[in-house]
């Protein structure tokens, strides 16, 4: 498990997923009009984070 944390793609993906979850949670507790930006940003961050983690998984599978 600690080998994954040495892979930069996994760490970046995990960071973006955590930030997207924070933005999504904050959207539900705010009633302002800026929450649309939080929604679009969190969806984009989530997609990018999943892509980075998926890409790092393929790379780590090739190593011995």
Image (cartoon, rainbow, N blue to C red):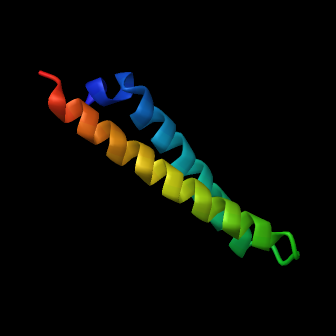
Nearest the eye: 30 or 7: 7
Task: State left or right for residue 39 relative to residue 11.
Answer: right
| Quadrant of the image occupied by residue 4 | top left
Query: At 63% from the left edge and 61% from the top edge, which residue is drawn?
Result: 42
Measured as percent of width and height from the top left, residue 58 is found at 25, 40
**Quadrant that contains the N terminus:** top left
The location of residue 6, given as percent across then percent down, is 36, 22
Q: Eyeballing the image, is 32 above or below 5?
A: below
Q: Residue at x 47, y 43 (%)?
A: 14
Rendering coords of residue 36 (x, y %): 77, 73
In the image, is 23 to the left or to the right of 11?
right
Question: 11 above or below 6?
Answer: below
Q: Quadrant of residue 43?
A: bottom right
49, 26: nearer the viewer = 49
The image quarter containing residue 29 is bottom right
**Which corner quadrant holds the C terminus?**
top left
Work out whether residue 5 or residue 9 is closer to the camera in this orientation and state it: 9
Q: How many marks?
A: 0
Note whether 27 is above or below 21 in the view shown. Answer: below
Q: Residue at x 49, y 49 (%)?
A: 49
**Left or right: 28, with 3 as reference point:** right
Query: Residue at 40% across / 36% down in the picture?
Result: 10
């Amino acid at each position: 498990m600690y080998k994954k944390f040495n892979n930069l793609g996994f760490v970046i993906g995990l960071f973006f997923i955590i930030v997207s979850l924070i933005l999504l949670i904050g959207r539900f507790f705010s009633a302002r009009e800026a929450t649309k930006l939080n929604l679009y940003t969190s969806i984009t961050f989530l997609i990018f984070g999943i892509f980075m983690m998926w890409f790092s998984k393929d790379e780590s599978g090739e190593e011995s």
